[in-house]
Image (cartoon, grey):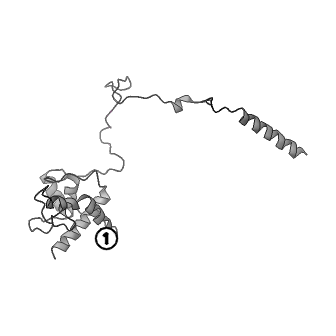
Amino acid sequence: MKHLIKITIVALITVSFTSCNKRTRPNYEYMPNMYESVAYEAYQESDAFANGVEAQLPVEGTISRGYMPFDYAGDTDGYNLAKAELTSPLDSTQVDLNRGKELYNIYCGICHGNKGAGQGQLVKREKILGVPSYADAGRAINEGSIYHVIYYGKNAMGSYANQLREEERWQVVAYVLSLKADLEK
């Protein structure tokens, strides 16, 4: 009998709270500043900073999350240094030529051709000219030079550093070297 009374009381309290709820009336906000934050414009005036502007530059020496700085300059000297020193951090178990091929076909094949012979669709349509084959004797390319060109671009080719993460760039480098080997046979 006591359990029945307790259940009845709990049921009445529950019904009374739910019956008084009006969906047309907003609920109480206990901490309204959590829901309605003060909006700031990026370049509005502010007394919080010495230069009087809300938007601030990152602190000197900071690096974006997920970004690794590249220690070679984007000029000819940096290219030659990368060609001489830079090697792939991927070992043979980490190289995925299928993934490299997929990325290559997306980003590189349109100009360089799917076989690396310099006969991509844009070259065939004469939209761009002068894309050499990877097998050309004058192109002594290696891991470092390919990575540098992907990172900074060269001549008419732009940089792909923003499109490809570091590991993806190295996968493309491995695939380009495999295309070069196939062309030289």
Residue bearing the label numbered 1: 92
**Per the image, is 61 magenta?**
yes
Residue lying at 22% horizontally and 62% vertically, measured from the top left = 109
- x, y (%) of residue 20? 72, 32
The front one of 19 and 101 is 19
Lateral position of residue 83 relative to residue 107, left or right: left
Packing grade of label 1 (10 A; few <14, some 14-19, many >=20) is few
- x, y (%) of residue 147? 22, 59
Q: Quadrant of residue 142?
A: bottom left
Q: Secondary structure at mark 1?
A: loop
The front one of 55 and 130 is 130
Residue lying at 36% horizontally and 28% vertically, measured from the top left = 54
Under mark 1, the amino acid is Ser
**Per the image, is 79 magenta?**
no
Which quadrant is home to the C terminus? bottom left
Q: From what the image shows, is residue 71 above or below residue 92?
A: above
Residue lying at 15% horizontally and 74% vertically, measured from the top left = 184
Q: Quadrant of residue 8?
A: top right
Q: Is residue 88 visible?
A: no
Q: Quadrant of residue 149?
A: bottom left
Write down the region rendered in magenta: 55-62
| Outermost front residue | 125
| Outermost bottom residue | 185
Q: Is residue 35 visible?
A: yes
- x, y (%) of residue 68? 31, 51
